[in-house]
């Protein structure tokens, strides 16, 4: 069945109503959600789900939202779900977001903020040229936009409303889930998979139109503590141990080109993202990433070996290292049920979208959910340049993502007649 048109202005209005609510998460908080302001959008979403006629709408003590769209067919269909997160990254401020709408973009430089000379240019961000003739929503250059992942939230909400308003589109039972704290790695930590009750789900949390992902990094975090000894510098010969010099030796012992700025595709890396040091003690904080499980384990072993070798070299325990796994490649859990990827690919092709099937160079709630028993590939939400002032989203991509949700629901019901 050919889908009826998604209401463009309605989608824009909904998206703007979400991004103008500050939902930045906080990695230094031990509460869930990590910031109280996330409740502002969480409660709004729960109220909107009820108002549009969704069933079994719930919001728990940790702000996890779930809702159900009942089946409108009389045959058994697997229960599918769609999931997005409503927090935004602490990497860049999400307070006082002032979205700017650019109609009929023609490939020109976009002055986001004339006063601060902040320009979104296709000379640097070439993807802009993919969207000539379309409507773009940008920042004003002083905040992020929040399309990660309020675009996904908008698309799921618009899709559910569209299915409710157009009952001739046949579908099985659909579950909706919205989570806090994904940006600080905790989005799935308290997600009740059993309560959600889906056979499989899709996160609407990708970027460019057409993205369809079922592979992500295996991930670990490493903290290297380097122990020194402070002595008066005038009398330090043979006595002082400057931990910062020793720390630089550890850094230089790792492969110099296996870092984020030198890798792409399936290539893994070590990423030193924080250094805090003085003579007495220095702390190095790393993330370790690789799609291949054996290479991932080898990376962790290499870091441990460097610490051991350096301690042996100096004959004392200068280096202490702690490595903790964070998440794993969902490919292992999705490949046995590849039909769920096939349905999404079929939906895109039916809507004249070219599927871009590629690995995620990062993580997603879907990774953790897959290992919790809910296989969960990732689908594009449409935005670009996440986590910063140059973030933008083409409205037409959001409309297509909304249509993909509806088409997946329709195809799933049809495939299981």
Image: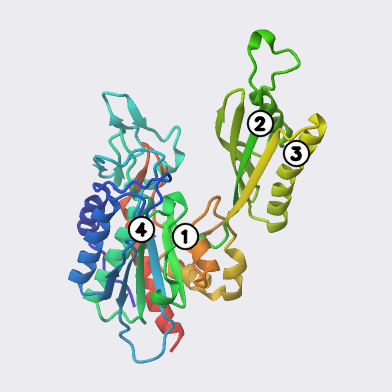
Distance in Å between CA atoms under marks 4 and 3 = 42 Å
Q: Earlier in the sequence, mark 1 or mark 3?
A: 3
Q: Is residue 217 visible?
A: no
Neighbour class for label 4 at 10 Å: few (<14), some, many (≥20)? many
Assign a secondary structure to mark 3: helix
Label annotation for residue 152: 4
Distance in Å between CA atoms under marks 1 and 3 = 32 Å
Instruction: Give x and y (percent) for residue 378.
Output: 47, 61
305 horizontally vs 70: left or right: right
Q: Earlier in the sequence, mark 4 or mark 3?
A: 4
The image quarter containing residue 197 is bottom left
Distance in Å between CA atoms under marks 1 and 2 = 36 Å
In this figure, which residue is indicated by the disc labeled 3?
A: 306
Front residue (pair 99, 308): 308
Instruction: Give x and y (percent) for residue 222.
Output: 61, 44
Q: Earlier in the sequence, mark 1 or mark 2?
A: 2
In this figure, which residue is indicated by the disc labeled 2?
A: 227
Label annotation for residue 83: none
Q: Earlier in the sequence, mark 2 or mark 4?
A: 4
Farthest residue, direction left: 51
Residue shown at 28%/64% (left/top)? 157
In this figure, which residue is indicated by the disc labeled 1?
A: 365
Instruction: Give x and y (percent) for residue 359.
Output: 57, 56
Distance in Å between CA atoms under marks 2 and 3 = 15 Å
Tag in front: 2 or 4: 2
Q: Are marks 4 and 1 in contact (CB under 8 Å)?
A: no
């Amino acid at each position: 069945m050919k889908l009826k048109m998604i209401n463009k202005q309605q989608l824009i209005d909904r998206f703007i109503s979400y991004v103008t609510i500050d939902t930045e998460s906080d990695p230094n908080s031990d509460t869930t959600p990590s910031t109280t302001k996330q409740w502002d959008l969480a409660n709004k979403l729960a109220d909107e789900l009820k108002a549009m006629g969704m069933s079994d709408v719930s919001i728990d003590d940790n702000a996890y939202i779930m809702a159900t769209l009942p089946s409108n067919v009389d045959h058994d269909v697997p229960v599918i779900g769609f999931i997005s997160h409503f927090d935004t990254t602490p990497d860049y401020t999400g307070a006082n977001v002032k979205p700017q709408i650019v109609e009929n973009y023609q490939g020109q430089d976009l002055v986001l903020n004339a006063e601060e000379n902040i320009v979104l240019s296709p000379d640097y961000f070439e993807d802009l040229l993919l969207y000539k003739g379309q409507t773009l929503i940008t920042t004003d250059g002083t905040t992020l936009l929040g399309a990660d992942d309020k675009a996904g939230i908008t698309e799921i909400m618009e899709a559910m409303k569209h299915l409710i308003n157009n009952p001739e589109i046949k579908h099985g039972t659909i579950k909706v889930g919205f989570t806090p704290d994904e940006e600080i790695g905790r989005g799935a930590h308290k997600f009740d998979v059993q309560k959600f009750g889906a056979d499989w789900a899709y996160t609407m949390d990708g970027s460019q139109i057409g993205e369809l992902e079922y592979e992500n990094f295996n991930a670990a975090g490493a903290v290297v503590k380097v122990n020194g000894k402070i002595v008066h510098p005038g009398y330090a010969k043979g006595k002082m141990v400057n931990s910062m010099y020793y720390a630089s030796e550890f850094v230089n012992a790792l492969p110099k080109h296996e870092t984020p700025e030198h890798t792409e595709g399936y290539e893994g890396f070590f990423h030193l993202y924080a250094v805090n040091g003085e003579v007495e003690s220095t702390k190095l904080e790393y993330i370790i990433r690789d799609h291949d499980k054996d290479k991932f384990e080898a990376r962790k072993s290499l870091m441990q070996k460097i610490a051991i070798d350096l301690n042996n070299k100096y004959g004392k325990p200068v280096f202490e290292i702690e490595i903790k796994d964070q998440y794993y490649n969902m490919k292992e859990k999705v490949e046995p049920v590849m039909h769920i990827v096939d349905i999404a690919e079929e939906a895109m092709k039916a809507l004249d979208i070219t599927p871009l099937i590629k690995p995620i160079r990062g993580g997603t709630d879907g990774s953790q959910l897959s290992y919790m028993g809910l296989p969960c590939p990732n689908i594009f939400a449409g935005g670009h340049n996440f986590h910063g002032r140059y973030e933008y989203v083409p409205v037409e991509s959001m409309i297509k993502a909304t249509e993909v949700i509806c088409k997946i629901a329709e195809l799933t019901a049809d495939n299981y007649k």
